[in-house]
Amino acid sequence: VQLVESGGGLVQAGGSLRLSCRANGRSTWTIGTMGWYRQAPGEQRELVASITTGGGSTNYAASVKGRFIISRDNAKNTMYLQMNSLKPEDTAVYYCTAEVAGHATSWGQGTQVTVSS
């Protein structure tokens, strides 16, 4: 499945951004867990948040819990990450992922988020 992220950009600390990840070529009803990862310069890629097919179960990294909200709209084949109270340490390239049974995990191309202090 092809994943296309959007919504990144430059924002001041304390601001908000909403990232979107659209799945092309496959209904997200047929996709299992989807997630957001991020990678800052010189750092390892880390899981930010994940969500199951129906949205009934979500998981967050401790560093973003209470500030970020992951959701998905399967009618629109799209997953979102609402990021609030952004901090400079949230600066990274954000990637969305999708798991389909019997296939390798799909990754998007990434979208840059930069938070200025």
Image: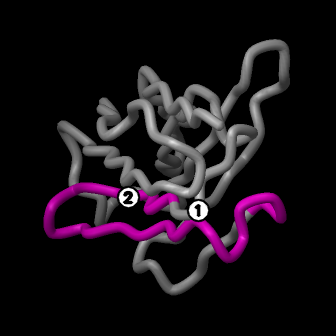
**In the depicted structure, whether residue 79 falls above or below residue 104:** below
Question: Mark 1 — residue?
Answer: 85
Indicate left or right for 58 with 99 as reference.
right
Per the image, label 1 sits on a secondary structure element best described as: loop
Q: Is residue 75 magenta?
A: yes
Task: Tell me if mark 1 has few (under 14), some (14-19) or many (20+) residues whose alpha carbon lies within 10 angstroms of its own.
Answer: some
Residue 3 makes an appearance in the image? yes
Mark 2 or mark 1, which has the lower sequence index? 2
CA distance for labels 2 and 1: 16 Å
Residue at 61%, 75% in the rendered image: 58
Residue at 59%, 81% in the rendered image: 57
Per the image, label 2 sits on a secondary structure element best described as: strand
Q: Position of residue 36 (x, y in %)?
A: 56, 47
Which of the numbered marks, if any, corresponds to residue 94? Answer: none
Q: How many discs appear?
A: 2
Which of the numbered marks, if any, corresponds to residue 80? Answer: 2
Task: Tell me if mark 2 has few (under 14), some (14-19) or many (20+) residues whose alpha carbon lies within 10 angstroms of its own.
Answer: many
Q: Quadrant of residue 59?
A: bottom right
Which span is picked out in magenta? 61-83
